[in-house]
Each structure stands twice: as C-alpha cells, then as structure tokens.
Amino acid sequence: MEEKKETFTYTYSAKEQEEIKKIRDKYAPPTKAETTLEQLRRLDGSATKGAAVVSLIVGIISALTMGVGMCCTMVWGEKLFIPGVIIGIIGIAGVIAAYPIYDRMVKRKREKLAPEIMRLSDELMK
C-alpha cells in the first residue's frame, strides 16, 4: 500500500504579513545605520529633554514647598504663621524660577549642538 501525504499550505494576507514583520523586527538585531535625518531629529529632541526634566523637578518640589507653607499658615495655627509665609514665598520663587531654568538650559544645549545640527542639515539640503 502506498501512503499518500497530504500537505496543507496557507498564505497570510498582506495585513497579517505586515503585522508579522513588525513583530519580527522588534526581536531582530538592528541592521541599518541611523540615517542622517533620524540623527538630526534625535539631536534636536535632546536639546529639550534634559532641561524639561530639571525644570519639572524644580517646579514640582517648589509647588510642594509652597503647599507646606500654606499648611503652616492655614492649618497648623498661629505659631507657624510667619515661618509658613516664608516657606510659601520660597516655594513661589522656585515655581517662578522653573521656566527661566528651562530656557537657559535649552539655550546652552542648543549652542553646544549647533555645529553638528548645521553640518547635518547642510548635508541633507544638498
């Protein structure tokens, strides 16, 4: 008796092929080098990331400090009123200082990155 092997083949649709490729690309080792445009975008984004983190930390800590000062003046009685006002003013000053800190840090980082950004953009514009 001859044994007959039946095979079954299935072809995925284009949409499923795309999804399979995306999943596979997540696990494949990186093969292509970073393009010039990607490098330009990465450098431009890095100019603001660090400054944003620092200014957010300063702003949050200052807002919490201002809240402690408000608690001292409104909740914890007359003994802590003057220290509460002083603590609140320190908190307000920190909140006000958060944006100038951000602005100054971005400006310094952009000055540092300017030659590389100009070189990459000139390369792309040619």
Image (cartoon, helix red, strand yellow):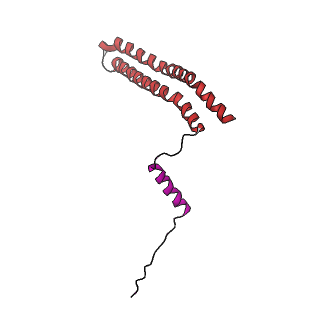
Residue 16: x percent and y percent? Answer: 51, 60
- Which quarter of the rendering shows the N terminus? bottom left
Residue 102 lies, with reference to residue 20, above or below; the image says: above
Pick whichever, 26 or 67, lies toward us: 26
Q: Residue at x 47, y 24 (%)?
A: 55
- Left or right: residue 123 compared with residue 85: right
Pick whichever, 116 or 62, lies toward us: 116
Residue 13: x percent and y percent? Answer: 54, 64
Q: Is residue 120 magenta?
A: no
- Which quarter of the rendering shows the C terminus? top right
Q: Residue at x 49, y 30 (%)?
A: 49
Residue 118: x percent and y percent? Answer: 63, 28
Residue that protrudes farthest toward the bottom in the picture: 1
Pick whichever, 7 or 74, lies toward us: 7
| Tally of numbered tags | 0
Residue that protrudes farthest toward the right in the picture: 126
- Left or right: residue 57 compared with residue 16: left
Pick whichever, 3 or 77, lies toward us: 3
Residue 49 lies, with reference to residue 8, above or below; the image says: above
Residue that protrudes farthest toward the top in the picture: 82
Q: Residue at x 68, y 35 (%)?
A: 125
- Left or right: residue 32 compared with residue 74: right
Q: Is residue 11 magenta?
A: yes
Q: Residue at x 37, y 18 (%)?
A: 69
Residue 13 lies, with reference to residue 62, above or below; the image says: below
Looking at the rendering, the stretch of residues picked out in magenta corresponds to: 1-29
Residue 83: x percent and y percent? Answer: 34, 12
